[in-house]
Structures are given as structure tokens and as C-alpha cells.
Amino acid sequence: MINYFPEEVLWHVFSFLTSHPDRNAASLVCKSWYNVERFSRGKVFIGNCYAISPERMISRFPRVRSLTLKGKPHFADFNLIPQDWGGNVYPWIVAMAKGSTNLEELRLKRMVVSDESLELLAKSFPNFKSLVLVSCEGFTTDGLAAIASNCRFLRELDLQENEVEDRRGQWLSCFPDSCTSLSSLNFACLKGEVNVAALERLVARCRNLRSLRLNHAVPPDALQKILAQAPQLVDLGADSFVHDPESETYNKLKNVMQKCSSIRSLSGFLDVNARCLPSIYPICINLTSLNLSYAPGIYSKELVKLIHKCKKLQRLWILDTIGDKGLGVVASTCKELQELRVFPSDLHVVGNVAVTEEGLVAISAGCPNLNSLLYFCQQMTNAALITVAKNCPNFIRFRLCTLNPTIPDAVTMQPLDEGFGAIVQSCKGLKRLSVSGLLTDQVFLYIGMYAEQLEMLSIAFAGDSDKGMLYVLNGCKKLKKLEIRDSPFGNMALLADTGKYETMRSLWMSSCGVTFGGCKTLAEKMPRLNVEIINEGDEMEGRPDDRQKVEKMYLYRTLVGPRKDAPDFVWTL
Amino acid sequence: MERAAAYENDLINLKATELRLGLPGTDESEKQSSRNNKRSSSEMDNSCEKDEQECAPAPKAQVVGWPPVRSYRKNVLHQKNESDLSGMFVKVSMDGAPYLRKIDLKVYKNYQDLLKALENMFKCSIGVYSEREGYNGSEFAPTYEDKDGDWMLVGDVPWDMFITSCKRLRIMKGSEAKGLGCL
């Protein structure tokens, strides 16, 4: 019956489909739906840039306006992947420029972005509006200058945690006087100077500016002047804050802050004198998001005073210097908390007692809406995790990281299997899980049994045998990404269900028990998988023995075969 | 490689029985020691947290990529640490003491902290500061040489101003300090 609907009707109906899974599902119904869907899809999400080629993407979705691409595997964040591995965005930009795509938005994560790419991007898409780069590298401020100069309708330039080389240039001054459309500007990750006068003028003429995150080079008196021009800001990031509470600048800042009643999100404070924090007290009451994870200069006492005022907080990122007691204050103050991230403050010291299971239990008791957690802690117990699971059944993301990767239950000295078991059993909507601490195969039995919605699992230094990995592969039907390091899983687990990998985006295994022979077998069996081995060092000469263990293996499903840009140290089997 | 887990486990158990130089219950304390730990190998004075660091079991070698923190974050905090750690070490002399000491002013949050530390270090009593009387009535008075080369009484200016202008400290005998205490 539905086939008799004219395409215009289908088109209209599909315009209400915004999520990718929904659109993907719709496109599978029949040829007609497939065609209507593909012409109407404006936002394309590609979780692994090597799963498909730019040309094929464009030919399937000719009307793409917004492209999201992810490149390197997640463990690249932790120095497990050498430089020049790949993930270059340039071929995508070239293809879209050639295909006259009307690109308006580009969002990249863990990709290599050259200045050449940025220049081509800036010159090829006249309606380009939004560039978001997260954890990328390969570009300099010259590339940013090209974007600023050429993208006449630029609304968003959001640079999050990228490695950017700073050239002696004036990229910020490259925004022409006619540019008034900016609504979001984030250059907190840049290390160098910016032309502060140009910044002030830019802010003054962009009346729609809602989000502004400055880097360390913008001095406090400039911050104060900028805020005076932009009281409509909703999101503010400032790394260089006032130092002297007796100074004129401090007074001016305090006054101007009071007028910034729209600010809901705050971040930065890399360089701050905690005694100047009272200047932001007036906006605390409205804050829903606070990121102090780059503010090592704020001691527990001042932090607690600040948090006391933030009763509406939904998202909090902090350093573990807050301590368990500080987390107790968060628990009693921030009743609407949904997301909490506690980062380690000192990575060089083991035995640095910062937060423990107590802080987490307190949070779970006080914040029942908590659904997303990243928690670096000194120690954990099963009892605590069981309590957390009971208090907060709504976790979607649960990532626990014990600073000592194989530490057992701090009280019973048992593995933490039962604790994580409780989490997966209670949190029926859990999509992402990272486990740590002393763990046996048992925890994976629980995960396989209960984690029905799990899409991403990170495992390190855990398990006893192949059974562990098998429990997960057999049980977690919705698994998309599995990343494992330093765990005793070998060929038996790898090869037990090779078809499974085509239902997943990718699998990473490093310092495990899989051998060259095992990986070769897998590659032969599954032509639509790329099985890549990363071998640094001197194993370049000749083929290694089949029995030799593989250092790092990354496999992913793909429609386009082995990639052509793999460097020397990457072998696609 | 599977044995790595068991090995780590043994190390953890070992730690529970190891001998330490620190006072009991000094594990949980203020995070300022985290800054000190970079220098812990050469310092023998002060806090017990540092002693614990020195005696900690050596095999906690850095595991690559653990804890899993983005390099960006590590670099930012490390650089901040470095710039903070450039430290503000100043010499401290006390009248009658056979040798001088050195302290890092950045470790202290305020005058109270500093004076307490000095009292501990030199086993003296410095007393309480008052704007009118200085440290009158105390056995000792803390003074410092500022950037201009003048000898000033500790406590007159805001703390932040003090630590940036202090070149060295001298703990004077109360009798000598009377001249500085009142105007």
C-alpha cells in the first residue's frame, strides 16, 4: 500500500527522520524508499572513514550538507598508534569539491587535517557554515586563516583538544569586517598569541555569538572587555583568569559577569588564582555545565565553595583533587547532575589518593539522574559498584578507570567482577562500558548475559582465557566497537565467530594472544574486513612466523577493500 | 603475559606490608605534595607524603597508555605543572642557626601556612602577625628581602604580592625585630 504514496509524500515523511539508525532502517525497506531516503539525507555520519570511499558516499548521498567523519581508532588517544597511521581528510574534501557538493558542515574526530585540506575546504564550498575538529592534528594557524578569510557565512569554528602548530600569523584578523555571522568560536586549544584587538572587534560585530572559548593568550583585561561586548553569551571558556583580587581588572570582571545572565556553560581556568573565583559566583546559579578539568590551580576548598552555588548543574568535569569529600558536596548540591567526569590530576604519582569508591557512592546516592560517568580512581570495591548500580539504573555510559589497572577490590581483595556485573544487570540501557581493575572471565560472562544494548566496550588487563572474549562476542548483540589491550585472548576467541565482525564497526586488540596465523586466517575468511597489523620496529624484513604474536591488530568492516594510504608499518592481511 | 595480572596483584599485597618512614595515617593529605613529588628524590625535609613516594615499590613502571588520558590533556596539565614547578625557592636563614634552609614559596597558600612551616622547620615560635604590632611579643619575627633589596616584615602585603617579591627570608630574633615591628 505504501508503495502507492507519491515520492513527495515519502520525502515529507522522511524529513522527520533525523537519527541515522532510523534513516538506515528506512533505506532498507525497498528500492523506492532507498532512493527517496538517499536523496533526502542531508546529514551523513561515517564512524570509520575507511569503511567507505568518498566517491561512493557522494554518489549515494548527493545532497549531503553535513558530514561527520571519524578516523583513528579510539586507542590512538593514548599513544598506542604511531604517527602517520592515516585518517587523512584530504581525499574527502577533494571528492566533495569535485562533486560540487553543497557542503555546509564538517565534523571530524581523530583525523589528520592539513592546511591544504583547510584551504581547499575554505575555497570550495560557498555556503560552508560549520567546522568542528575534535582531537585532530596536522594543521597550523595558516589553515585557520584560510577558513576565516574565505568562509563568508561561517557560523561555527569549534576546535576541541587539537594539536595545532602555531605560526606567527594573524589568523583571527583574517575574519573580514563583513563577517558577522559567528555564533560559536572555540580556540582554547591554540597555544599562541592572538590579535586581541581583532578579537574584540570580531566579538562586537557578531551579535549572534553564543559560545566563546578563548585560549590562554587572551589576558584577563581583554576578557573583561570582550564579555562587556557579549552579555548574550551562553557558553564561555577562559583560560587566563584574573590573579589579583584587589585589582581594577578583577572589579571590572566581577561587574561584567553579573550582566552575563545567559551563561549556562563554563570552562577553562587553566591559569587562575582561586581567590578570584567569587567573580563568577553570580552566574553559578544558572550553570548547567561546568568544566574545571583543566584547572589544577583550584584547590578543593575553593572548588567546594564554587560548587555549592551550582545547584542546577547537569554536567560536571573536574579533577580528582576534589576528593571524596568534595564529591559529597556535589552529591548534596547538584541534584540534577546527569554527567560526571573525574580526571586524574597527577599522572606521575602512584599512591596519589585522590578519589575512591566513597566519592562515587555518594554521587550515586545524591544524583539519581546520573547517566554518564567517567571516573578515574585510586581504588574501587564491589560493594560500592553494587550500590551505585542500585542507585543509578539509568547509566548509558559507564567508564571506570582504576589508576592501577589490575587493582582488586580494596576491601575484600577479590576481583571486581561482581561489581561490574551489577552495573550491567541494573543498567538496561547501557551503551558504553569501560572496565578496569582485577577482572576474571566472570565479568565478561555477566556482560554477555546482561548488556543487551551495549555498543562499545573497552577492556584492559582483564580476563583469564578465550572464554572471556567469547562471552562478549556471543552475548552482546548490539556491539559495534570492541577494544582490548593486554588481555589473554587468542586465536580461538578471534576466530570462533568471524561473521560477527561484519556486524561491528571495528575490533582492536593489542598485546593479546592473537598470532599472525590467526589474523591471516581471519582475513582470508572475511574479504569484507580489513585486518590491519601494526608492527613498529624491525619486523619489516620478511614475513613473520605464523606463530608469532601480533603487537597490534585493528580490524574493521569495509566496502572498499584495503586502504591505499596505509603506511609501511601497517600491513593489511 | 597472563601472569602480568597476578604479578601486579602480588605487588599490591606487598605494599600493604612494606615499611615506611612516614607517620601513620599520612596517606590522605592535601594535594600540594603532588607538586613536591617531582623533587622528592633530593629533598629530605618536610612532609611524610614525600617519604612515602620515595619508599613506594619501584616496579610501578609507567605502562604505555595507562591511565588512558588523551595526550592533549596530559600535555596541557604537564606544561602547567612545569610552569608552576619552576618553583619559588628562597633561602631561609635563622639567627643563630648553623646553616640555611630552602623552601618553595609556591607550596604554601597563605601566610599562616608559611609561618607554621617555618615554625616546624626551625623549631621556633613566631606568633601571630598584627598590623600595628608586627610580631611583638614573639621570640622570633619573620622578615624578607624584597626585589628592591629592602628588608620587610612578613605579613604586610597581600600573599600573592609577597611571593612574587620575596627574594629571601630571614627569621630574626624578637629583640632585633622590634625596630621593624612598629613605625
Image (cartoon, grey):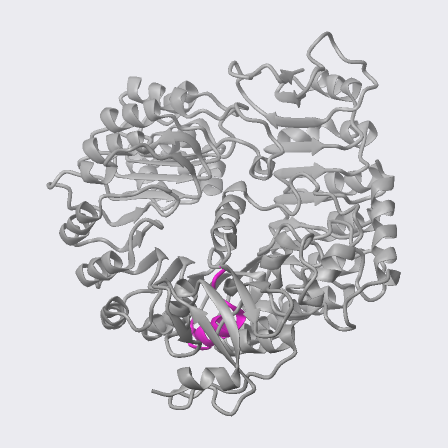
Q: Which x, y percent locates residue A183? A: 24, 50
In the depicted structure, whether residue A313 falls above or below residue A462: below
Give the number of marks.
0
Q: Answer above or below: position of A471 versus B81.
A: above
| Image side of residue A277 versus residue A174, left or right | right
- Residue A502: x %, y % from top left: 63, 28
Write the residue at 29% across / 23% down: A120
Point out the image quarter for the C terminus of chain A.
top right
Question: In which quadrant will I find the N terminus of chain A?
Answer: top left
Q: Is residue A493 visible?
A: yes
Q: Give the range drawn in magenta.
A: A296-312
Is residue B81 or residue A212 the one in the foreground? B81
Which residue does the image show at 41% across and 22% down from the upper left? A54
In percent of width and height, residue A154 lies at 23, 40
Above-or-below relation of A146 to A132: above
Q: Nearer the viewer, residue B50 or A308?
A: B50
Q: Which residue is drawn at 70% across and 15% down?
A: A538
**Which residue lies most toward the left here?**
A178
> Residue A307 magenta-drawn?
yes
Q: Is residue A230 left or right of residue A323?
A: left
A452 magenta-colored? no
**Could you tell me if residue A368 is visible in this image?**
no
Image location of residue A530, percent across then percent down: 62, 21
Residue lying furthest top in this view? A542
Quadrant hosting residue A522: top right
Q: Residue furthest bottom?
A: B137
- Please state which of residues B29 and A468 is positioned toward the viewer in this rendering: B29
Residue at x 48%, y 35% (from the top left corner): A110
